[in-house]
Image (cartoon, grey):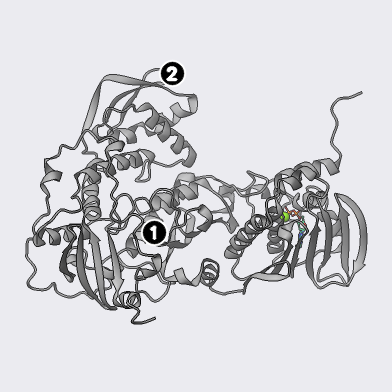
């Protein structure tokens, strides 16, 4: 008797279902994707009991005739690709031809569909993968798929289902993400007969974004768009103060498909570097468009992951565009000022702010992380986000703001009120839109100034380098060695000098003095791992640049002006001037804000003068 056999289709379908149908939300995803591929303009999703008892998706798309409907339930039956060339230029959301048979193999499944050429509709009932009944039925053009008792014949799977609210949460998140990518489609989601979401078709994508993310944040969403090397990026990113604590507020799309992609996610975080504290996630909706043949979507059965042909190019475009967009939007107060001559009283040569401690301190060795003080003045005491004055701008849809007009003299437009608790500099700012109270955290501000100074030195290749008396050897595997060879010159520019030592062995000859006497092997391995993962070129978002930045942050923190340190008025002014000259004046290197602003309206609200 032969020991190897081809599995019957009902078993192979169940195996496929194991990958494709993880939970009710995956069924919803597959069905809605099919509806979108069928060019529907209205999709309604009905759920009962978190999807355990019922999942129903109705669409007004092209529908199918009887033959196609029967074929659609066969494994590997698809209308979306015909040749292997198509496989590398996928334009639809589906293409594997396995969703319908997989779902039908683990549920009680009913399909009702009609296309425009058929006088009557078709109803097909499949129970646990067994074709039960095929009949004619009256039906509008479009498709209605009903799934009852998901996993009724796979009790092991059923056991893994979570509570109704958890499963419903996954469904709602998935539907929202798909709706975000298709604003011209009306999408409705009902649970136990009650409408949960009802997004009307909109002409302007931002309206869908706001419908989903909430109207309250619309003024803190910055539009972005850029094209480079045939790669396009568009979307919106949130001001760093409307962060989330999970990645659920990050919506990423590649050629219209919602993905969880590490390259894009990493690039997004690189763009926010220095603006978000650890563990926080930005709010972002990013649409990346690449030529169809430059992205492989056939990487995973759920099609959540993609592989780019040129990850570094994608990474670079996103990281730089996000960083630029944040930068341009961070000086709303100062940018709002009309261009006019600086007030006469301003000193021609403003005093340079040099607190004794920063200049007398040698640049190395770096202090150990344990010694880093935890600045406490802002942590946990920030006013609720609502109390912050929103930037004054008409709406989120507009081209990115111009570069600041009056960068260097901006601080002079602030009237200083004085120092509060030796820690904050209070200022009055009269902008076009009224008076604001601006509170600058002097420690955070000075940290930013020192950090950017240090960074210029190091990234310009002028940072102190420490030659190792006993060179450190490092043993790598083949892949790591190949990558290291490629990026060695760039690492050398940053002060990390590594030479080949036969086979896959290397020796470390010199390190940036900032890294101190710590072992470099773990750092190098991390750099190689990250480079392999994102394929990033040694650009500002390079992992070595980032670990150097971490050291610089520590140094900046140590040499920066403390809280509770009285400084003269001239010094306060110089501090503000230097802060304004920074690349990223709005945040300290840890990502905390350097200033907060209160409009008179916000103050009056706090005093109950206006509601
Ligand atoms: N809602 C729908 N409207 C029209 N046709 C559909 C719909 N759902 C599925 N189909 C047809 O059934 C085929 C099989 O669907 P599916 O198993 O999801 O595979 P895939 O989407 O990968 O092609 C699709 O290629 C499509 O032709
Ligand atoms: Mg499909």
For the N terminus, the image quarter is top right
Q: Camera-side residue: 266 or 94?
A: 266
The answer to whether 180 appears left or right of 348 in the picture is: right
In the rendered view, tell whether residue 397 sits above or below residue 370. below
Percent position of residue 168, x then y: 66, 59
- Give the foreground label among 2 and 1: 1
Q: Quadrant of the C terminus?
A: bottom left
Quarter assignment of residue 416: bottom left
Q: Residues within 10 Å of mark 1 (few under 14, many from 20)?
A: many
Is the CB of mark 1 within 8 Å of ligand 2? no
**Residue 311 placement (x, y as % from top left):** 49, 45
Q: Tell me the SS state at disc 2.
A: loop
Q: Nearer the viewer, residue 592 or 341?
A: 592
Q: Residue furthest front?
A: 608
Look at the numbered discs 2 and 1 and tell me whether their residues touch, using CB distance below 8 Å: no
The residue located at (74%, 46%) in the rendering is: 159
Among the 4 quarters of the image, the one containing residue 470 = top left
Q: Which label was assigned to residue 240?
A: 1
Instruction: Give coordinates of residue 312: x percent, y percent.
Output: 45, 45
- How far apart are the alpha carbons under marks 2 and 1? 46 Å
Q: Residue furthest bottom?
A: 610
Instruction: Name the disc covering residue 503, or none.
Output: 2
Judged from the image, the quadrant occupied by ligand 2 is bottom right
The mark tally for this picture is: 2
Q: Which of 240/508 is in front? A: 240
The percent position of residue 392, horizontal first and vertical second, equals 34, 74
Q: Nearer the viewer, residue 15 or 491?
A: 15
Asked whether residue 38 is in view, the answer is yes
Compare marks 2 and 1 and give the one earlier in the sequence. 1
For the point 42% across and 74% down, the residue is 395
């Amino acid at each position: 008797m032969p020991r190897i056999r081809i599995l019957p289709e009902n078993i192979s379908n169940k195996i496929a279902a194991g990958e494709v149908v993880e939970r009710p939300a995956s069924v919803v995803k597959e069905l809605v994707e099919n509806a979108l591929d069928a060019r529907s303009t209205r999709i309604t999703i009905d759920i009962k009991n978190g999807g355990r008892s019922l999942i129903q998706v109705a669409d007004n798309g092209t529908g199918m005739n009887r033959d196609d409907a029967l074929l659609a339930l066969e494994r590997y039956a698809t209308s979306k690709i015909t040749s292997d060339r198509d496989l590398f230029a996928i334009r639809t959301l589906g293409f594997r031809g396995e969703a319908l048979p997989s779902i039908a193999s683990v549920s009680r499944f009913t399909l009702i569909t009609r296309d425009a050429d058929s006088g009557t509709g078709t109803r097909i009932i499949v129970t646990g993968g067994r074709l039960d009944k095929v009949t004619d039925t009256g039906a509008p053009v479009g498709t209605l798929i009903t799934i009852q008792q998901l996993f009724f014949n796979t009790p092991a799977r059923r056991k893994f289902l979570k509570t109704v609210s958890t499963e419903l949460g996954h469904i709602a998140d998935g539907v929202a993400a798909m709706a975000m990518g298709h604003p011209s489609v009306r999408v409705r989601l009902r649970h136990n007969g009650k409408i949960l979401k009802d997004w009307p078709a909109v002409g302007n994508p931002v309206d869908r974004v706001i419908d989903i993310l909430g109207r309250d944040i619309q003024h803190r969403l910055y539009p972005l768009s850029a094209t480079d090397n045939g790669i396009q990026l568009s979307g919106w990113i949130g001001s760093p103060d409307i962060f989330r604590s999970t990645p659920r507020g990050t919506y990423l799309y590649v050629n219209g498909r919602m993905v969880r992609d590490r390259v894009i996610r990493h690039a997004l975080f690189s763009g926010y570097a220095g603006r978000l504290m650890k563990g926080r996630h930005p709010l972002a909706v990013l649409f990346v468009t690449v030529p169809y043949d430059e992205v492989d979507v056939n990487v995973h059965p759920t099609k959540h992951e993609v592989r780019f042909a040129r990850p570094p190019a994608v990474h670079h475009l996103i990281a730089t565009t996000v960083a630029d967009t944040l930068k341009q939007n961070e000086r709303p107060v100062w940018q709002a000022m009309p261009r006019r001559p600086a007030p006469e009283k301003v000193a021609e040569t403003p005093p340079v702010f040099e607190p004794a401690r920063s200049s007398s301190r040698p640049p190395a060795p770096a202090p150990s992380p344990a010694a880093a003080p935890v600045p406490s003045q802002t942590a946990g005491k920030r006013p609720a986000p609502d109390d912050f004055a929103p930037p004054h701008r008409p709406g989120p849809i507009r081209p990115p703001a111009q570069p600041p007009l009056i960068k260097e003299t901006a601080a002079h437009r602030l009237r200083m009120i004085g120092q509060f608790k030796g820690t904050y500099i209070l200022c009055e700012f009269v902008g076009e839109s009224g008076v604001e109270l601006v509170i600058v955290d002097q420690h955070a501000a000075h940290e930013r100034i020192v950090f950017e100074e240090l960074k210029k030195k190091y990234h310009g290749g002028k940072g102190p380098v420490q030659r190792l008396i006993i060179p450190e050897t490092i043993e790598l595997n083949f892949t790591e060695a190949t990558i290291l060879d490629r990026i060695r010159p760039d690492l050398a520019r940053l002060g990390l000098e590594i030479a080949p030592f036969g086979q896959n062995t290397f020796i470390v000859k010199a390190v940036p003095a900032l890294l101190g006497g710590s072992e470099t092997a773990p750092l190098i391995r991390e750099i190689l791992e990250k480079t392999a993962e994102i394929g990033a070129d040694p650009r500002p978002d390079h992992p070595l640049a980032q670990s150097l930045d971490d050291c610089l942050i520590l140094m900046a923190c140590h040499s920066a002006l403390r809280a509770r340190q009285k400084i003269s008025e001239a010094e306060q002014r110089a501090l503000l001037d230097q802060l304004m000259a920074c690349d990223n004046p709005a945040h300290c290197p840890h990502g905390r804000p350097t200033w907060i602003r209160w409009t008179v309206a916000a103050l009056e609200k706090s005093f109950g003068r206006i509601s």
